[in-house]
Image: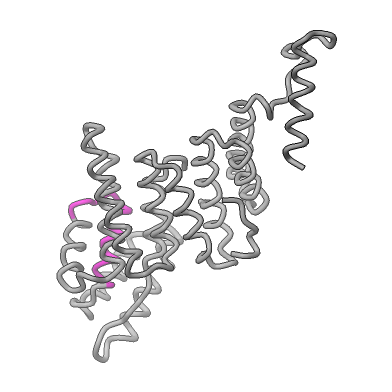
Amino acid sequence: MTKQFYRKQPLNVCLALLISGFLAVFALSGCKGGSRTSTEDELAHAKKLISQGNYTAAFMELNQALSEAPKDPNVHLNLGWLYLYTDDEANAEKELGIARALAPELAETYHLQGSLYSYKAQKAKTPEEAKREQEAAVESFRQSLSRDDKNYQAYFDLAGSLAALDKQDEVLETLDKGFEYIPPKDLETQVNFEIASCAANAKLQQFEDAIADCQQALRFTASPASRERIEEMIENMKLMNPALRTLTPEEAPPADSKAAKEAEEQALINESSSD
C-alpha cells in the first residue's frame, strides 16, 4: 500500500478498531428545535473529554445531550460507542437499537452495528462462532460505506474484520481505499493504516512491501513506544525473508564455499530487481 503521506494506527486489529472507530463517530447532524446548538456543543465537548480519557465526564455530557434531544440518533450512537469502548456490550446494544429505530439507514448505525459484531467475535467461544460474527461485521461495515464512502474509520474497521477472516488481499484493497480520505494532518491514523498494511503484506509473505509500509509508519511516528514496536516489526520481516537478512559471522558460510557463491549471486539478483 506504500503511498506518500503528503498525498493523504495492532496486528489483528479488532479491539483497536473499535477504539479508533469510536473516536471518529462524532459527525453531528444536530436535532430539530431550539436545543440544536447546545446539543451539538455537548456532543463536541464529549468527544474532547473522551480524547482526554475522562469517560465519566463524557457520559455526563452525553446524558445531558440525551435529555435535550432524546430522539437525536447521533446522541444514541455516541452513547453506544462509549458503552462499547467501556466494555458495556448490553447498553451498547440498547443504544444501537434506539438509533436503528430512529435512523435505520444512517451510515453510522451500520458502522456501530459492525463494530458490535466484531467485538462479539473476540469473545466467541468457538472459531465457527467468531467467523459468523466477523462475517456479519464485514456486511455491516460495507453497508455503512455504501452510505458514506469517505469514512476512513469504517474502512479501517472493515479491514480489521477482513484480517480476522484471513482475507489479506481484501485487507490491502480496503486500506488503500480508506487511506485517501484520511486528513493530511492526521499522522496517527496514517501510521495505523500503514502498520495494518504491513501486517497484511507480511501474512501474504510480501516482505519487501511489508517493510516499506512499516518504514513509512516509522518516519511519521514520534512516540518512542510506537517506534520501538515498528522497528521490531521490520526486524521480524527481515528474519522471515532470508533474502533480506544480514547473516552474522557465525551464520555466514565460508568465503570460498559453494553456499557463499550462491548467496553472492542471489544478492546480485536482488539488487538488480530492486533497481
**Extent of the magenta region:** 74-90
Look at the image and tell me whether residue 54 can be seen: no
Residue 3, image x, y percentages: 62, 56
Q: Quadrant of residue 54?
A: bottom left
For the rendered model, the colour scheme is one colour
The quarter in which the C terminus is drawn is: top right
Residue 234, image x, y percentages: 62, 36
Q: Is residue 145 above or below residue 137?
A: below
Look at the image and tell me whether residue 191 can be seen: yes
Q: Is residue 67 above or below residue 221?
A: below
Q: Nearer the viewer, residue 184 or 257?
A: 257
- The main secondary structure of the magenta stretch is helix
Question: In the image as oriented, which residue stretches furthest toward the right?
Answer: 256
Would residue 169 appear left or right of 234 to someone viewing this image? Answer: left
Residue name at image x 75 percent, y 17 percent: 262
Q: Is residue 263 magenta?
A: no
Residue 256, image x, y percentages: 84, 9
Q: Is residue 14 above or below residue 91?
A: above
Q: Nearer the viewer, residue 92 or 131?
A: 131
Residue name at image x 49 percent, y 41 percent: 200
The number of discs equals 0
Q: Quadrant of residue 257?
A: top right
Residue 47, image x, y percentages: 40, 67
Residue name at image x 50 percent, y 66 percent: 181
Q: Nearer the viewer, residue 28 or 69?
A: 28
